[in-house]
Image (cartoon, grey):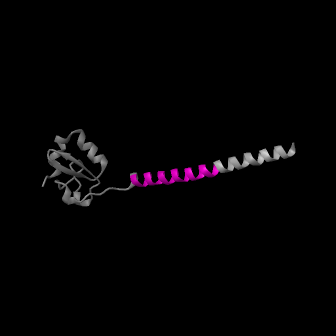
Amino acid sequence: MKLLITTSLLMASLVLLSCGANNDKTNTASADTAQIAIMDTTAEKTYAVSLVNNKKDPTCGMPVTAGISDTAHYEKNILGFCSVECKNEFLKNPKANLAAAEIK
């Protein structure tokens, strides 16, 4: 009887350990994937000044030569913005802010 219980416990332990080993690999892969996703979303995008038609950010007036982190298409123009927030503000009322863009 003791042999049966010992064997059963040993087999159960092996099953649990082998399942845990598989989960560790899965969790490691998931953690790696999560890190990659975080790296992709936090990576700052920049665009060349030659790609846009404006000299200044139409929302805040910052020169696009200081850096462009987002763009938008509006009336056949590609406009550069210093930030996503400036782009979103511009899109609320584009006609009011377009003159400040100093289109080339």
Instruction: Give yes or no for residue 22 being in the magenta stretch.
Output: yes
Picture quadrant where residue 55 is located: bottom left
Instruction: Give the percent coordinates (x, y) of residue 36.
Output: 44, 54
Please name whichever residue, 76 or 20, is drawn nearer the observer in this view of the structure: 20
Magenta residues, start to end: 20-40
Kindly report the secondary structure that dominates the magenta region of the rendered protein: helix
| Quarter the N terminus occupies | top right
Instruction: Give the percent coordinates (x, y) of residue 10.
Output: 77, 49
| Residue drawn at x 40%, y 54% as measured from the top left | 40
Instruction: Give yes or no for residue 85 being in the magenta stretch.
Output: no
| Residue drawn at x 55%, y 53% as measured from the top left | 28
Please name whichever residue, 19 or 70, is drawn nearer the observer in this view of the structure: 19
| Residue drawn at x 27%, y 58% as measured from the top left | 67
In this view, which residue lies farthest toward the top?
A: 92
Please name whichever residue, 89 or 23, is drawn nearer the observer in this view of the structure: 23
Picture quadrant where residue 75 is located: top left
Instruction: Give the percent coordinates (x, y) of residue 66.
Output: 26, 60
Left or right: residue 70 compared with residue 23: left
| Residue drawn at x 63%, y 52% as measured from the top left | 21
